[in-house]
Each structure stands twice: as C-alpha cells, then as structure tokens.
C-alpha cells in the first residue's frame, strides 16, 4: 500500500503571498532547492538537492513536471528522484485572517524514502513560513 505525507499549515499571509512563495523560482530556491520552475502545466523542471557530506549524502536531482496550476489556489507536480515516483499537491484556502495550506506528497512505496521525505518537508515548510514572515514584515 502506498503512503502519503499530509500537512496542514496556517499562516497569516494572504493567499497571493503564499502563492508567490510556492511558484517564484527565487523564493522556491530559498526555502526548498535551486530550480528551473515555471507555472505552466506540462513544464518539466528540476530541483537540485545539494550534497551533505556530514550525512554522507551526495546530493541528487529531482525531476518534476507541472500537473496542475490554478493560481492562486492549486499547484501539483510530479516528484521523481531515482526509484521514488511521487506527486506533490498544494491547495491554498483563504481564511479571512490568512491562508490555510494543504500539502500532500503521495505515492510512497519505500519506507525509507517516506520517512526521509517527512523529515525533509518538516524542515522545508519551516523555511517556507520563515520566508513568508520576512517578506510580509
């Protein structure tokens, strides 16, 4: 059975501000990884995950394709790294006092990858909320 990582985040920033953080190439590089992202369905792009010698990690390239892009509400893309072939979905909901971010990465069939991705998204979403706080300050 395939597993999914699901997160729900609440931020005080507007949906438009969150959308920019999710779709602007420079912002993505700040909280996630260097990339060649574009908001166009069918666009193929990569994330360049840097090496971490202390963790004996050589780095990797994540291959992605935009599957759905409905500004400023929904963004979906494939996430393929080696044997890992998953899908990332973001859905943004205006709450009147900020934005609720629904996140899911689905399709894991390797426990090690599932655990590692869960840890990675916790770190990256922490960086995302920090970025949003800085740009709206």
Image (spheres, rainbow, N blue to C red):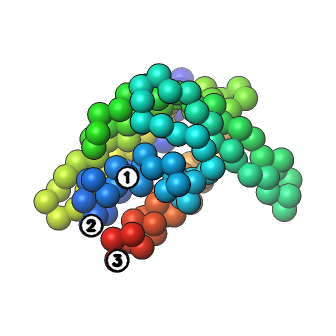
Image position, residue 57 (x, y; %): 81, 50
Image position, residue 23 (x, y; %): 43, 46
Identify the mark at residue 137; answer none if there is no mark: 3
Name the foreground residue: 48 vs 2: 48
Residue corresponding to mark 1: 20
Q: What secondary structure is found at the residue carrying circle 3?
A: loop
Tell me: 132 left or right of 119.
left
Specify which label sits upstream in the sequence, 2 or 3. Answer: 2
Specify which label sits upstream in the sequence, 3 or 1. Answer: 1
Tell me: 52 left or right of 76.
right
Q: What secondary structure is found at the residue carrying circle 2?
A: loop
Q: Disc 3 and disc 1: Cα gap in Å?
A: 15 Å
Specify which label sits upstream in the sequence, 2 or 1. Answer: 2
Disc 2: CA contacts within 10 A as few (<14), some (14-19) or many (>=20)? some
Q: At x 28% / y 64%, what residue is drawn?
A: 13
| Quadrant that contains the N terminus | top right
Q: Disc 2 and disc 1: Cα gap in Å?
A: 14 Å
Tell me: 18 left or right of 104.
left
Q: At x 61% / y 51%, what residue is drawn?
A: 33
């Amino acid at each position: 059975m395939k597993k999914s990582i699901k997160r729900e985040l609440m931020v005080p920033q507007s949906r438009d501000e969150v959308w920019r953080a999710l779709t602007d190439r420079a912002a993505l590089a700040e909280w996630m990884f260097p990339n060649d992202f574009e908001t166009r369905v069918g666009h193929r792009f990569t994330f360049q995950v840097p090496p971490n010698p202390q963790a004996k990690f050589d780095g990797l390239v994540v291959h992605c394709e935009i599957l759905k892009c409905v500004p400023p509400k929904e963004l979906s893309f494939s996430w393929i790294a080696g044997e890992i072939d998953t899908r990332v979905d973001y859905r943004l909901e205006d709450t009147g006092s900020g934005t609720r971010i629904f996140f899911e990465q689905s399709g894991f069939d390797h426990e090690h990858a599932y655990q590692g991705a869960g840890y990675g998204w916790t770190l990256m979403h922490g960086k995302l909320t920090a970025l949003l706080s800085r740009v709206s300050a």
